[in-house]
Image (cartoon, coloured by chain):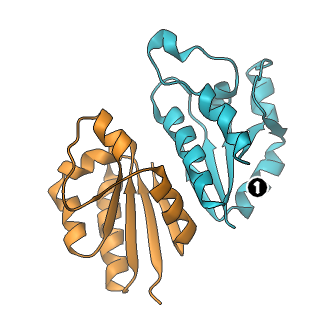
Chain colours: A orange, B cyan
């Protein structure tokens, strides 16, 4: 069974955290891990960052806190799941490893 | 069941991050994990009576009141609370020594720091 890496990202694309998350996710995919990223707070701004969204086409499941996205005027895009804090609870509950970038 | 600790160290009203961390703490209870929110250093100001609406900031109290109802624990560092002369704590908060808090963190499966 594939191991799962869960990631919480709450910072926008100016933060070095975003590049770290991209590189970590790519490394985990190379190790055949399943990767799920939850975006909340300013992390939802990454929906506008092409390099980040490309992770979706590589196999990363990206879930967004819709509440935070709507309050920041971010529109839904097809590459992500429009979710809630319930999704974060599920990711944290089921991941083999969970990392947070705040 | 996993133990998930949300550690809050920053001032509650400078940004919306603390209210978001608390909202997240409430949300994390939806998976039947053990959730504990620990306040350290300037984060301890969040557990006293605040009026965030005066500066148009998000309400913290609803999360602090809800969390214990969902079996979430709220813990604060006893020394940090004392040092900041915080006497009025209207929520269900357990005050612990720094050593005990370190033990709680060490026992956690997931640590989310704000």
Q: Is residue B87 above or below residue A75?
A: above
Q: Is residue B53 left or right of residue B76?
A: left
Residue A93 position, x and y percent, is 57, 66
Q: Residue at x 59, y 55 (%)?
A: B30
Q: Is residue A24 above or below residue A2?
A: above
Q: Is residue B56 left or right of residue B35?
A: left
| Residue that protrudes farthest toward the top in the picture | B54
Q: Is residue B22 left or right of residue A41?
A: right
Residue B91 position, x and y percent, is 75, 28
In the depicted view, which residue is nearer to us: B92 or B17? B92
Residue under label 1, please give it. B104
Q: Residue at x 84, y 42 (%)?
A: B97
Q: Is residue B33 left or right of residue A73?
A: right
Q: Residue at x 44, y 86 (%)?
A: A2
Q: Residue at x 32, y 62 (%)?
A: A62
Query: Dot 1: what SS?
Result: helix
Which chain is mark 1 on? B
Q: Is residue B47 above or below residue A26?
A: above
Residue A11 position, x and y percent, is 36, 46
Q: Is residue A4 above or below residue B98?
A: below
Determine the image quadrant of residue A75.
top left
How many residues crowd around disc 1 within 10 Å: few (fewer than 14), some, or many (20 or more)? some
């Amino acid at each position: 069974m594939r191991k799962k890496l869960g990631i919480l990202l709450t910072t926008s694309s100016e933060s070095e955290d975003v590049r770290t998350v991209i590189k970590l996710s790519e490394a985990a995919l190379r190790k055949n891990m399943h990767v799920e990223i939850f975006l909340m707070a300013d992390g939802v701004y990454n929906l506008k960052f092409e390099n980040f969204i490309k992770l979706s086409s590589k196999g990363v499941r990206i879930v967004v806190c819709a509440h935070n996205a709507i309050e920041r005027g971010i529109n839904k895009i097809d590459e992500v799941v429009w979710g809630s804090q319930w999704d974060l609870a599920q990711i944290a509950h089921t991941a083999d490893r969970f990392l947070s970038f705040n | 069941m996993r133990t998930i600790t949300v550690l809050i160290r920053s001032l509650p009203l400078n940004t919306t991050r603390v209210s978001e961390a608390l909202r997240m703490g409430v949300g994390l209870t939806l998976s039947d994990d053990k959730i504990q929110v620990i306040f350290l250093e300037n984060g301890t100001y969040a557990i006293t009576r605040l009026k965030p609406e005066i500066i148009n900031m998000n309400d913290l109290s609803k999360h602090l009141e809800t969390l214990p109802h969902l079996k979430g624990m709220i813990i604060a560092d006893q020394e940090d609370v004392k040092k900041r002369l915080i006497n009025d704590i209207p929520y269900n908060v357990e005050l612990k020594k720094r050593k005990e808090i370190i033990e709680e963190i060490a026992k956690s499966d997931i640590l989310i720091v704000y």
